[in-house]
Amino acid sequence: MNCLSTIQEIFHPLFHRYQIQVFVKRDDDIHPIISGNKWRKLKFNLKHIEETPSIKGALSFGGSYSNHIHAFAFACYQHKIPCVGVIRGEENYANNYTLTWAKHWGMKLHFVDRKTYRRRHDADYIAELQNQYPNYYIVPEGGSNKLAIPGVAEVITELNQQVEFDTLLTPVGSGGTLAGLITGDCDIKKQHKILGVAVLKGAEYLKDEVNNLLPKHAKSHSSWQLLTDYHRGGYAKFSLEDSQKIIAFNKTTGVNFEPVYSGKMILALLDLLEEGYFKAGERIVLLHTGGLQGLGGMIERGILTKSDWPTIQPVTDISISGD
Ligand SMILES: *Cc1c(COP(=O)(O)O)cnc(C)c1O
């Protein structure tokens, strides 16, 4: 099996001090613009759409800076599938960094207010949308459905060929990625410890979400854990100190992590190390889920300063679309 992404060892004085080895699975490198786990989660969804002639298009949900919407728009463009994004927000968001790209790839933006967006899992609202977009295949927010699982599970198949390790860390948003990793880990001989770092507050409910996404045979996996105390204040929240820590880590290791998802995994790793969580000699893999496009929007909104993230260059020239 060909590996979609490479594995890379990274070095840091703390790794040396605690005598651990750390590797990064570079899913951020899967595609120059679309990166990471969204790509993996969409793989079998796209296959299903292509193999089902009655499906005429695809629809999904997201916030106005959503990595999922960004990836979904590009994936549909590439597979020539008409697509709709149900976006939480107003029309004037349509020109932001993320949605400009989505439009560029042909996504029809369907804006809804917060109240309507909250109904995104309700059967009656889904039926309404299905009426409005007949024969469209509806993918939930974040792309985390049953078909996302086998795509993410391939990370483990690849790792199995690439590196020996004890523990795998991943950031967690909706739980689809974590569920996919657990599933993949059940299909190989030796099981690993799989640690999910929740990037949002009050994430205890995600344990059930992950369990619900697991196919039967994967429910027996006994060494996964969701860490819910490393969210740094909530989704997309982080302190100046947090972002400076991530920037310093990026400089030391030469790999770029952003503060919403992958960077929170890094902050958790550093905290866990100081807490003595890892044993000397342990080999740890970090899944770099990508998400660097999100920096474009954060720089646009003044939340981050471009010069602080010198090695990250958001693609701003839409005409050189990298497609
Ligand atoms: C969506 C996303 C995640 C979270 O994945 P889930 O499957 O929703 O838990 C992690 N990292 C990045 C970069 C993402 O875009």
Image (cartoon, helix red, strand yellow):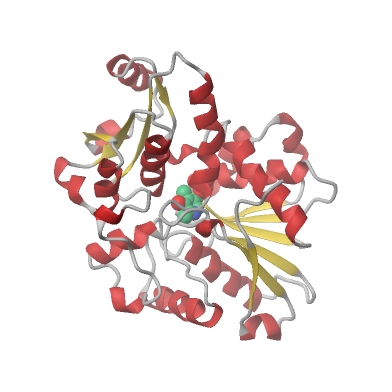
Side (left or right) of 199 relative to 273: left
Side (left or right) of 109 relative to 285: left
Q: Quadrant of residue 179?
A: top right
Residue at the far right in the pictured view: 189
Side (left or right) of 187 relative to 285: right
Q: Residue at x 66, y 43 (%)?
A: 153
Side (left or right) of 68 relative to 215: left
Q: Nearer the viewer, residue 85 or 81?
A: 81
Q: Residue at x 37, y 37 (%)?
A: 77
Q: Is residue 3 visible?
A: yes
Q: Is residue 174 visible?
A: no
Query: How many numbered callouts?
Result: 0
| Residue 160: x %, y % from top left | 76, 53
Look at the picture and state if 255 lies above or below 320: below
Q: Nearer the viewer, residue 176 or 273?
A: 176
Look at the picture and state if 194 lies above or below 38: below
